[in-house]
Amino acid sequence: MLFLQLVLLVVLLPGGDSEDAFQEPVSFRILLTTSFYNSSWTQNQGSAWLDELQTHGWDNKTGAFIYLQPWSKGNFSNKELLEVEELFYTYSISDPSIYHNHVSEWQLEYPFQVQLVLGCDSHFGEASVGFLRIAYQGSDLMSFQNTSWWPSPKGGSRAQQVCTVFNQYIFSEIVQKLLSDYCPRFLLGLLDAGKAYLQRQMRPEAWLSSGPSPGPGRLLLVCHVSGFYPKPVWVMWMRGEQEQQGTQRGDLLPQADGTWYLQTSLDVKASEAGGLSCRVRHSSLGGQDMVLYWGQPHSVGLVFLAVTVSLVLLAGLALWLWKRWKTHWRPQCTGFPVQ
Ligand SMILES: *[C@@H]1O[C@H](CO)[C@@H](O)[C@H](O)[C@H]1NC(C)=O
Ligand SMILES: *[C@@H]1O[C@H](CO)[C@@H](O)[C@H](O)[C@H]1NC(C)=O
Ligand SMILES: *[C@@H]1O[C@H](CO)[C@@H](O)[C@H](O)[C@H]1NC(C)=O
Ligand SMILES: *[C@@H]1O[C@H](CO)[C@@H](O)[C@H](O)[C@H]1NC(C)=O
């Protein structure tokens, strides 16, 4: 995992200026989940994603797409978008009957869920032909390849039966067009329209803290790195130039503003914590790693702050006293009648 991140960084860092096409693979996915509660009641939920970023919602009453980013329409015309909306509407809202009608034949049991994922990938400015898969109760049922539906090996006889029916009813030219034309074209248009947003560089903020003590005489040093974008980041506990092999990397967590958060910890003897540092490498830092030292310079910083604040306060006090003394001194000297 770490190695992978390193490779990504090596690829990423030199390509710092973001004029180039996207270097890393980017995927576009449309997810549609239909819950069948009984023979007359179904519920739909749909969304579309560019990697981890949701680009589209879906109104499950009208079947209309909801454009969540200003660039979510990519370069498609409203006419083309309506065509695609109509396809989804037909499949999901107006016609879930294909499942209802075959409940006993396919041995489906209410309540059940059918999930559909349609997507395509792009790499170095080229988009792949898309794919379409359907799952029943979370496990693969069938996929669309090369003009027809194919049962998933895990799907058993149910998958074969469903495929037979789908190959009769679901117009394969339309699906084929969605996958080989619409999806790759839409993805490239989307990447282009959203370029400024998707290729933005957000600098991380980093800070240190100590975690729950791992045992007597030991410390858990925690390095927090927050608010960075894009996702690839390298964070390591160091002693001088030496990477500390015990560094534990947490999961990369998404934040509400579309940036990422990572926590990296190191379990050390309390007596050996001095001289350790947390080093952060990220494409937004322009090749200049961020380094945070455990203990010493941190407290030097605090002392410096305390001294500065006290000096400013003292200077303010002195000035105030001096002004006060100046204004009160004159009248006292000249104006006091001697009685
Ligand atoms: C389906 O479920 C809904 C909600 O529980 C219920 O109102 C409805 O009567 C059910 N229909 C059938 C045919 O069972
Ligand atoms: C639409 O989705 C919401 C959840 O996002 C669900 O509560 C609602 O029942 C759905 N409506 C239909 C008609 O599927
Ligand atoms: C898809 O089908 C065409 C003919 O229908 C065939 O020439 C081609 O090799 C197939 N491709 C794959 C990957 O199966
Ligand atoms: C949108 O952009 C893609 C990729 O640059 C291009 O192939 C396509 O012709 C453009 N226009 C439409 C309407 O898809």
Image (tube, rainbow, N blue to C red):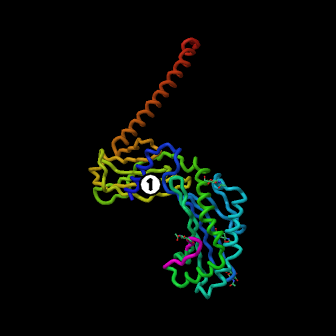
Q: Amino acid at mark 1?
A: Leu
Give yes or no for residue 144 being in the magenta stretch: yes
Quadrant observed for ligand 1 in the rendered image: bottom right
Residue positioned 49% across, 51% down in the render: 23
Q: Nearer the viewer, residue 82 or 233?
A: 82
- Magenta highlight: main SS: strand
Q: Quadrant of residue 90?
A: bottom right
Near-viewer residue (214 or 185) = 185
| Residue named by callout 1 | 262
- Residue ranking furthest to the bottom: 104
Up-down: is 296 above or below 118? Answer: above
Query: Which sits in the foreground, 42 or 255?
Result: 42
Mark 1 secondary-structure assignment: strand
Q: Is residue 247 left or right of residue 137?
A: left
Q: For the N terminus, which image quadrant?
A: bottom left
Q: In the rendered structure, which segment of residues is drawn in magenta? A: 143-153
173 versus 298 height, above or below: below
Q: Quadrant of the C terminus?
A: top right
Residue 203 placement, left or right of 271: right
Residue 150 drawn at (x, y percent): 55, 76
